[in-house]
Image (cartoon, rainbow, N blue to C red):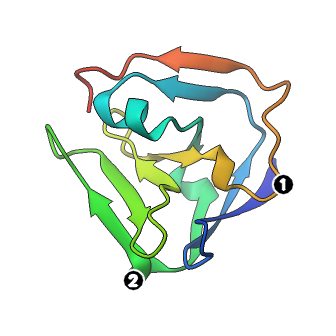
Amino acid sequence: METHLGSCHCQAIQFEIETDFPELTTCDCSICIRKNALRLKVHESNFRLKSGEANLTKYQFHTHTAEHYFCKTCGIYPFHKKSVTPDFYGINVFCLEGFDPEGIPVRATVGKGMV
């Protein structure tokens, strides 16, 4: 597994993940369609928030189990806590430094009704 650094646009929120990039996912739920994020599933033990906890704002809807996090300053969505697998984060891979998704399989997930 490799360590990768990530952040929001203004750098207020910084985090680190460990992953081997098995696959990336898209989602068709109402919020993911609007965010248009390409995500990576990372177990909470492989995620570390390095700075910016006070700058995070949480958005929840429908069942209020998934936790979607955004930067209060720049509005970027860096990650969310998954509702179906609450011990995993969904990482917005475009927030990772120097990340190139080329060659990594992308799987479409059905999120409608599973928010």
- Label 2 sits on a secondary structure element that is helix
> Image height check: is 105 above or below 89?
above
Label 1 Cα neighbours within 10 Å, binned few <14 / some 14-19 / many ≥20 = few
> Amino acid under label 2?
Ala
Residue in the image at 49% along x and 69% along y:
74
In the displayed orientation, state which residue is furthest to the left: 63
Where residue 113 is drawn, which disc sits there? none
Q: Quadrant of residue 63?
A: top left
Disc 2 versus disc 1: distance between alpha carbons? Answer: 25 Å
Q: Is residue 41 left or right of residue 100?
A: left
Q: Which of marks 2 and 1 is nearer the N terminus?
A: 2
Residue in the image at 58% along x and 47% along y:
92
Label 2 Cα neighbours within 10 Å, binned few <14 / some 14-19 / many ≥20 = few
> Image height check: is 109 above or below 96?
above
Q: Where is residue 36 in the image (x, y as percent from the top left)?
A: 50, 35
Look at the image and tell me in which quarter the C terminus lies.
top left
Where residue 98 is drawn, which disc sits there? 1
> Amino acid under label 1?
Gly
Residue 28 or 113: which is nearer the viewer?
28
Q: What is the number of callouts on the image?
A: 2
Q: Is residue 41 left or right of residue 21?
A: left
Q: Position of residue 67 (x, y in %)?
A: 31, 52
- Give the labeled residue for mark 2: 54
Q: Quadrant of residue 105?
A: top right
- Label 1 sits on a secondary structure element that is loop
Residue in the image at 57% along x and 27% along y:
25
Q: Position of residue 97 (x, y in %)?
A: 78, 59
**Disc 2 to disc 1: CB gap under 8 Å:** no
> Image height check: is 51 above or below 42?
below
Residue in the image at 42% along x and 50% along y:
80
